[in-house]
Image (tube, rainbow, N blue to C red):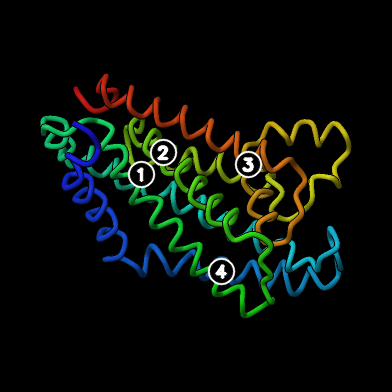
Amino acid sequence: MGLFNYRIALQSIWIKECVRFLRIWVQTLVPPAITMTLYFLIFGKLIGSRIGEMGGFSYMEFIVPGLIMMSVITNSYANVASSFYSTKFQKSIEELLVAPVPNYIIVLGYMGGGMTRGMLVGVIVTCISLLFVDIQIHNMAIIVATVILTSAVFALGGLINAVYANSFDDISIIPTFVLTPLTYLGGVFYSISMLPEVGQWVTQANPIVYMVNAFRYGFLGVSDVHLGLSFAVLFGLIAVLFATALLLIKKGTGLRH
């Protein structure tokens, strides 16, 4: 039986995940909007006016795509990590594991919920950015493709984090010590061409660099890395993380005691 035969199960998990974060929208949608507004004010208006141009664009124009992508990344990840771990903590994951539903449907359902929240927050942040700068669009297809693929990557990452987590504190370890540094060093606030040669070489090991630059290319038509390589990295990460999530659920890692 294929995906179509399990569409009701997939829809149920996906909708449940969406209802979950929409029910507490004050906690899930408002904080990132406020945070990004502060970024626009501080980095865009106050500091940006002193920096001047970067890559041939005003500093505000340059950082807007990166800030939108940062909000997509953090919210896609956080939604699945917290939701899936809560399901584990409440023991309701056992109901899914014994149900006649294949593991890939479970993964896709949670992944879809995380992607929905990430992209919704991305839309909200984009609307807020219009208050500060006139956004130009170079290629809408690349913008949409990049945001979908990036939200999928980090939704899967959040699920894997939740599988291994043994407490609610474990949910914050990866975002704090891995995700945040990688995001800030991923070219959100600067062009990697500004770095020394060694710095550029090291930065290319950061996958977020490829996501931010592909997204920026969609808006401004400029990128520090090859667009094809960016999408290759995105598809590769999705394949690896999806396979890993499936394997962990199949083995019952962190789920069966």
Q: Position of residue 183 (x, y in %)?
A: 62, 46
- Residue count near mark 1 (Cα–Cα under 10 Å), binned few <14, some 14–19, many ≥20: many
Which secondary structure lies at badge 1?
Answer: helix
Name the residue that disc number 4 marks.
Answer: 126
* 96 relative to 222 in the view: left or right: left
Comes first in the chain, label 2 or label 1:
1
* Above or below for 213 versus 178: below
Comes first in the chain, label 2 or label 4:
4
Q: Nearer the viewer, mark 1 or mark 3?
A: 1
- Residue count near mark 3 (Cα–Cα under 10 Å), binned few <14, some 14–19, many ≥20: some
- Residue count near mark 2 (Cα–Cα under 10 Å), binned few <14, some 14–19, many ≥20: many
Q: Residue at x 60, y 40 (%)?
A: 231
Q: Residue at x 88, y 38 (%)?
A: 196
Amino acid type of disc 4? Thr
Query: How many angstroms separate mark 2 from mark 1 (CA)?
Result: 6 Å
Residue 111 disc label: 1
Query: How many angstroms separate mark 4 from mark 3 (CA)?
Result: 22 Å
Name the residue that disc number 3 marks.
Answer: 182
Amino acid type of disc 1? Met
Q: Position of residue 40 (x, y in %)?
A: 66, 70
